Image (cartoon, rainbow, N blue to C red):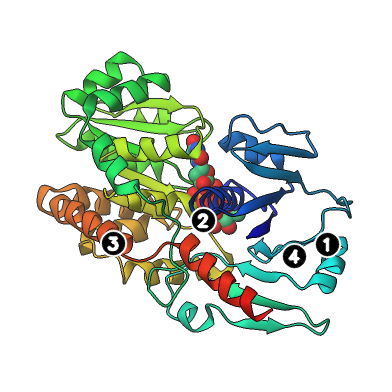
Amino acid sequence: MQADIFCRVVDNYGDIGVCWRLARRLAHGCGWDVRLWVDDLASFARIQPGIAVDRARQSCQGIEVVQWTDNPDPGLTPRDVVIEAFACDPPPVFLDNMRRNHPVWINLEYLSAEAWVESCHGLPSQRPDGLVKHFFFPGFTPATGGLLREPGLSAARDAFQADPAAQDRFLRGLGVAEAMLSRRSNGARTVSLFCYPDAPVAALARVLAADPQPALVLAPQGVAPGLETACAIPGGPAVARLPFVAQPDFDRLLWCADLNFVRGEDSFVRAAWAARPLVWQIYPQDENIHLEKLDAWLARYPAPETAAALIRAWNVPGDAEPAARALTHALAPAAWQGWTQAARDWDAAQAALPDLAENLASFCAELAKKR
Ligand code: TRH
């Protein structure tokens, strides 16, 4: 298959994060020839070293990257499959060409655990101009498009998690100081923190300070700017700032941590694949719709109620007290043990389902036959 993936960066790194991961998975796992159109190469460059921010066309890891501008090259005509991420609409000149050669057209939707996703997944939308767009929904059940997950991921993760020396080498390579590494080898709890600016980080610092087990917080540069100040309290956790890294290294970072605070869409899924406890800060939406989505996922996530209460509290900005109380309960030994087991169970259950790229590839192949 030859495909065009269109990615418009609304904000943050999730749009390009999902599209880049999908492009690599389709190219390297399914043998597709992929062209990725991106309107914000600067965001892309932050999560993929080597991307030039000012090149109209470039190749990265066997994928052609096209800078999506207001005047795209009309010579870049549609091929077998067009995937628009998150309803971003291909450019008009490209659409004109689509009316001529009728490629398979997919709208890849946002991830949600809500039940209605199953009934909408795969539905066609017939347009007045004769083109048909199909909705493809990621999700957590066999009746959805699934989640992106590379073959061999569990084995690579298990080997890395069983190898403290490899973890030390990895963290050292990211600039983590020897004192921090010793803290880890002496039993400190490693926490990774990737959150939005309103996350109750002071509550996290206070609870970790009061916990009998020392802690180390690993946070990307620029995320949670108040973290160092919040942690500068008696018994407070040590803080290590890390550069933004490429996606495979971001996985390794999550695999190093005992507890991962993640956000948005893609880092949330990757934290699930770490098979360790995770706290999800969901992308905020108007009228708190996101809290319904959060509850829909919590209804599926097998963690104890203490963990669910913490995840809910972490998503309510303002009063940090409920988050602090919930975190204290969730870290108590029996609750923590239950959560750790649940994280393994969740990973194993989800890993048993076909991944999004496999599902998408067979869905497109079926549609292509009918063209
Ligand atoms: O950055 P985000 O908050 O993105 C959000 C969400 O996707 C949200 O749903 C969407 O509507 C909005 O963007 C526009 O969080 P997310 O989804 O976790 O994306 C972060 C990406 O960045 C993910 O692919 C992991 C990647 N990343 C790295 O590759 N290296 C890093 O060092 C870090 C910190 C992140």
Query: Alpha carbon of mark 4 to alpha carbon of mark 1: how far?
Result: 10 Å
Query: Alpha carbon of mark 3 to alpha carbon of mark 2: how far?
Result: 36 Å
- Tell me what residue is drawn at x 68 percent, y 82 percent: 125
Q: Position of residue 35 (x, y in %)?
A: 69, 50
Query: Which dot, 1 or 3, sits closer to the camera?
Result: 1
- Tell me what residue is drawn at x 83 percent, y 62 percent: 94
- Tell me what residue is drawn at x 55 percent, y 78 percent: 122
Image vertical order of residue 73 relative to residue 81, above or below: above
Query: Which dot, 3 or 2, sits closer to the camera?
Result: 2
The residue pinned by badge 2 equals 30
Q: Position of residue 78 (x, y in %)?
A: 77, 61
Query: Which dot, 2 or 1, sits closer to the camera?
Result: 2
Q: Earlier in the sequence, mark 3 or mark 2?
A: 2
Image vertical order of residue 236 relative to residue 207, above or below: above
The disc placed on residue 89 is 4
The residue pinned by badge 1 equals 94
- Tell me what residue is drawn at x 82 percent, y 53 percent: 76
Q: Earlier in the sequence, mark 4 or mark 1?
A: 4
Please state which amino acid type lies under the numbered disc 1.
Answer: Phe
The disc placed on residue 308 is 3
Q: Earlier in the sequence, mark 1 or mark 3?
A: 1
Q: Earlier in the sequence, mark 2 or mark 1?
A: 2
Local packing at callout 2 (Cα closer than 10 Å; few below 14, some 14-19, many 20+) is some
